[in-house]
Image (tube, helix red, strand yellow):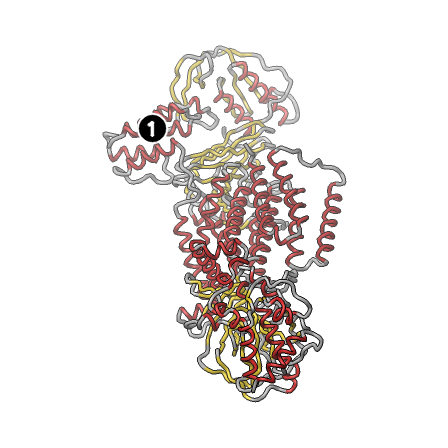
Amino acid sequence: MVSAAARSTVAATLVFVASVLLIALDAPAWCVVIALGAATWRVLVAVGYIAPLKKFAGRRFLLGAFTAALVIAVAASFRTLNGLAAGTALLLVMGALKLLESRSRRDDGIVVGVALFMLLASALATQSLLRVPLYLLTVWGACAAIALIADRGGSLAPRAALRLAARALAMSIPLAAACFLFFPRVAGQFWALQRADQATSGLSDEMSPGSISRLANEYDPAFRVRFEDSPPPQAALYWRGPVLNDFDGFTWRRDRSRYYPGANLEMLGAPVRYRVSLEPTNQRWLFALDTVDQVSRRDAFMAPADRQLSVSEPITGTLSYDGVSYLATRNHGPLSTLGRRYETTLPLDRNPRARALALDLRARSGSDAQFARAVLDWFRDNGLEYTLEPGVTTLDSVDTTLFDSKRGFCGHFASSYATMMRAAGVPARVVTGYLGGEWNPVGGYYIVRQSDAHAWTEVWLDETGWTRIDPTAVVAPERLQRGIFDLLPDSLPATSMFLHNSVWLNRLEHLWDGANHWWQERVVEFNAGAQLDLLRDFGIDSPSWQHLGWAFAGGLVLWIAWVTLTLRRGVARVKPDRIGRAWIRVTRKLARIAPAREPAEGPMEYARRVGTHRPDLAARIDALASLYARLRFGREADHHQIAIFEREVRNLTL
Amino acid sequence: MPGRETVKTPEANVSDERVTGVFPVFPIKDALRRRMGAWARRRQGDDRLPIVISTRRVYILPTRAGFAFAGLVLVMLLAGLNYSNSVSLLITFLLGGFGMIAMHLTHRNLAGVALRTVAGIDAFVGEHGRLLVTLENSADTARLGLECEVAGGARAAVDVPAGGTVRADLGLSLVRRGRLDVDRITLSTRFPFGLFRAWTYVHVKTGLLAWPVPRGRRETPPEATSGGNTPAVHRVGDEEWAGLREFRSGDSPRQVAWGAYARGRGLLVKTYLSPAAHYRLFDLATVPGADLERRLEQLSAWIVAAHARGEHYGLRLAEQSLAPGAGNEHRQRCLNGLALYGSGEAW
């Protein structure tokens, strides 16, 4: 059996291990290895498999030097000690060192404290619903460990400690909920840590042949959209992302130096209101439906020429914003000369055949609009194939797509179309983004996945201004109605297809995604503003901090009253021993003939008092009480004597 | 001067008192504790046993671990607020609530416990005297990790089962001959999470005697003869029944007449007669020497030796004396006389 001291150490170390595993992915591997190694060693020492480190003269010095070396190692690998990642690594190695030198229960307590800090770091890094149960389990374990550390007598079994901790935590849930809703939050940060660089995901501000089809394999959500009213038709769900204006014959880029004022835009039709929850991309683009009028973020910037939305910092966490868009617009006034020049620039030495075809078609068309239609017709009639695997391409990528391989994905067609427009002097640009989305009936929102990535063009026509033309729509018209998974099943990974096709899994996935989205919208993004909105729902017209404070204080008072009432009955529910149980049975029986036993009333006094109520039973009750007194206060009672006592109690009839 | 060694609260010197960690590091801790004790004394007055610890007399403060836990929660709160990180705020609030529940649980663990009896068990100087404190738990839940403590450093941790009674055995180191007064028993608990310490003071007058160490090489005084029988407590080999007498502290539970107790006659002890033809008289006046303590120690040595041999002996200390007798009770009365000699207290 493990001793009480060992139990405390093992519990603390296990909690430490749990939180190390929680942040294992966010920390350098060598720190995790050191921490887990130290924890293993500590547990083995605690249960007696290994002898503890002997005390020797230079021990403290050695430990100090070791500490310094590890701190320097962390600082060197991160080039800073500020920042969540570096702080986490530092916590890991410091916790490991604490384990190496821990001896007392106080040290065990410190280890649990370090574990809770690591849990905090983990929660700061990831707030996903999936991890919440793990966080709660760790908190539970930590609380049980605290109980075991405090239990010096060793009378608390680990199971009892877990039960105690569970009870205490369960009772604190209402307070946690009240605090969460009403504890006044602050808007903005008062202290900023650096965040580690992360890989970007999703669309970037570059598009080469094949860069969109790479995304088509990814089933991950890019963002989720909830429409305030009824959603527009599927084919109108063009989510505009990076607008690309600079072409070198192979790759389209966004050149931010090509800045020109936009034309006056008139919004037509009814506004479409929606809320986007954008998954982290580590890039700065926001996505909005079609022509966006406004977004709810103050730090969002809208480029005047192409209404491209961006924010100042890379998006590292889920970001939500409300958008108002219009599906129809009209331009007033011509495109500026500068704009016309920028949007018609092409490298003169690339894609000669496409340029020649464009000039030919333009010469046969009466207007830019007719020319645009003629090129679309050409796209439709020349046997272009919509595929995820268009094969190799050359530097003259447009020529390859249109004349050699005749195969392409949306990016290829958009690039080719825009090139032909520009070659004929018609301003055109490539827009990347997403098309469509998957309706989640559970949550009532659209999931737009990376696989919905799309590219199309916008062409300046003097009558309508910037006009969306999607060449993919003529090559593969069904793309507008359905997602890529339905169109090109063979070219996609089997796992994604399986997920997509199985009705059961699909429904399960919708459920899970719905729960995630709810978590994201209602819990993760619950902030100072949402708190005030909540008060407004309660009927307070102009809520303020004071109202929050009152609500919080009220909740606290109610909770304390509830806790006091609930706990009135006692603490740990441990069953009384056999003697105690039998005696309680006696007092219950006797409660029918005399007032209950006073807390400080001894068994003999009690028996005497009961005897006055029923003189006929007095001798019997007295004998029982004295038997009880002998068993309880005398020498260790053996099983036989207790059995006799229990039989006497059973036989007591009133 | 021999006599009462008063380890009284609150004015007494408590420098050797074990650190109990109500306040972490401050040197003013002792002073605060003393003031707290004095205040509680004025507030509560003297107590009579048995006593049920009411919530009004349960005091509670965070322990060092509790302060550390609060600091941790505070840092987590600041981090959560700073980053508007809902999940870490949830965890923080959960832990904060846990801390408050821990306070309630600790308070509840102590409130309602009953202190039934306190009995001192005397011993020789240099040994450990004992203070037996009987705690009763009438609740239907166990009370774990109760600590019983008296000024002077003795402390015992007990678990009291639901509906059960437990005796806490406090060792008291006896350093000086005489009466060791205990007038305050501190009952405390940190169960279940050690984040808070709830405690209560029970002010009862009790104490125990420190007998002089049996030490000395002088020859035992010769036996004298006398007639008459004196009743004494049962010894092996003694046969003749002499009746019951009141229980006195120090009597073994084996000699208690439980049957009589069960009939409600209170705690009585069975005694037997034994023939006493010869006895020795131990007289302080006949012990030479300048140091009173050494002379008393010599008497103590004689008493212990005579008792071991099963002899009869009497004791004379200046104006008080004890007729010859034998047995545990007699030995104890004699030793008590030695302990109290010079204090002016009757024995």
Which chain does the numbered disc 1 sit on? Answer: A
Q: Say which amino acid is labelled 1.
A: Glu
Residue B281 position in % (x across, y down) = 54, 17
Residue B108 position in % (x across, y down) = 44, 46
Q: Residue at x 64, y 83 (%)?
A: A260
Q: Is residue B31 above or below residue A577?
A: below
Q: B195 or A614: which is nearer to us?
A: B195
Helix, strand or loop at label 1? It is helix
Kindly tell me whether residue A317 is visible in this rendering.
Answer: no
Q: Which residue is mark 1?
A: A646
Q: Residue at x 41, y 48 (%)?
A: A567
Q: Quadrant of residue B214?
A: top right
Q: Is residue A270 above or below residue A317?
A: below
Q: Is residue A165 above or below residue A125?
A: above
Kindly tell me whether residue B229 is visible in this rendering.
Answer: yes
Label 1, residues with CA under 10 Å away: few <14, some 14-19, many ≥20: many
Task: State left or right for residue A521 relative to residue A407.
Answer: left
